[in-house]
Image (cartoon, rainbow, N blue to C red):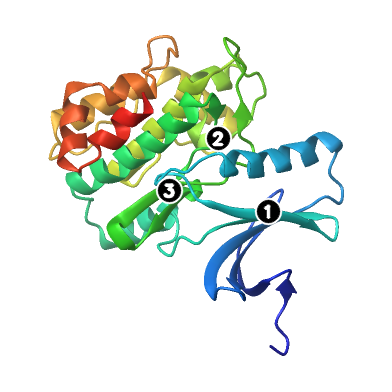
Amino acid sequence: MNGEKIIKDYIIKERLGLGAFGTVFKVLKKSNNKIYVIKKISYIGLTPKQINNAKLESKILSSFQSPFIVKYHESFEENNSLYIVMEYCDGGDLNQFISKNKETGILLEEEIIWNIFLKILIGLAELHKSRILHRDLKPLNIFLKKKNFDIKIGDFGIAKQLEKNRFAQTIIGTPYYLSPELCEELPYDDKSDVWALGCILYELCTYKHPFKAKCQASLVLKILQQNPKPIHENYSQNLQSLIYLILDKNHKTRPSCYDILHLSYVVEKLKVFGLYDKAELIY
């Protein structure tokens, strides 16, 4: 063990990522010899509100036992930091998956796109059912496991518990996935996450963002005023229609996760992939 860094019962194997509020490590738990991921959030320089938000991520993860949400193992505080221990997803993140496939120059098969989309959709529906907004849904925060091609939503660092009949008002998220209501600094709800899901679906079909610009001001204008270019004609009309349905600039008419899960052609796909029962259990 010479030179190895140890946190509590965990040996740090490698650093996986570094974000604004945390560092993510791949670790080995000594007591059971299993691989996990630890997210370390240092309290140094954080306000009391930011510390509470960090603890909220742990609380959110611990409340879910879903095959489509990254599984929580434990959390603890040590050396003025919070450590959140989660399952390790050995397939990397969806952004890496998209990048690797883009390099081949071959578009994803439609069935692969549906498989990924439906699993994210069910996980997001579970969050929304519990009145939790993710607020930063993007390929970097969606993780893959090689076994059974499992897809899991993770990184709840800026998630928010939505009070009943209330809209959130903090402007937050990644620019490419910002909804029109966020761009206009309007109150928003779960439909903003749905917009981000639509952006991810478009990216799976094209390897491109639906809206892209050289600066954030131009990007905001495109999100508010333009429609994305059609996906390749080889994809089904249902897939094309679903993208435009989800990327509805009016959040009032944009479908919720519940609405999408009850579209007839989505129901058929859920049955094809053996996911119908899991979706039905949510509602």
Q: Earlier in the sequence, mark 1 or mark 3?
A: 1
Mark 3 lies on residue: 152
Q: Quadrant of the C terminus?
A: top left
Mark 1 lies on residue: 75
Q: Total of numbered circles in the picture?
A: 3
Residues marked 2 and 1 touching at CB (< 8 Å): no
Q: Quadrant of the N terminus?
A: bottom right
Q: Give the residue type at disc 3.
A: Lys
Q: Which mark is residue 175?
A: 2
In this view of the protein, can residue 211 be seen by the observer?
no
Q: Is residue 110 above or below residue 126?
A: below
Q: Quadrant of residue 234?
A: top left
Q: Residue at x 50, y 36 (%)?
A: 176
Residues marked 3 and 2 touching at CB (< 8 Å): no
> Horizontal and vertical percent for residue 145?
38, 59
Q: Residue at x 41, y 29 (%)?
A: 125
SS assignment at label 1: strand
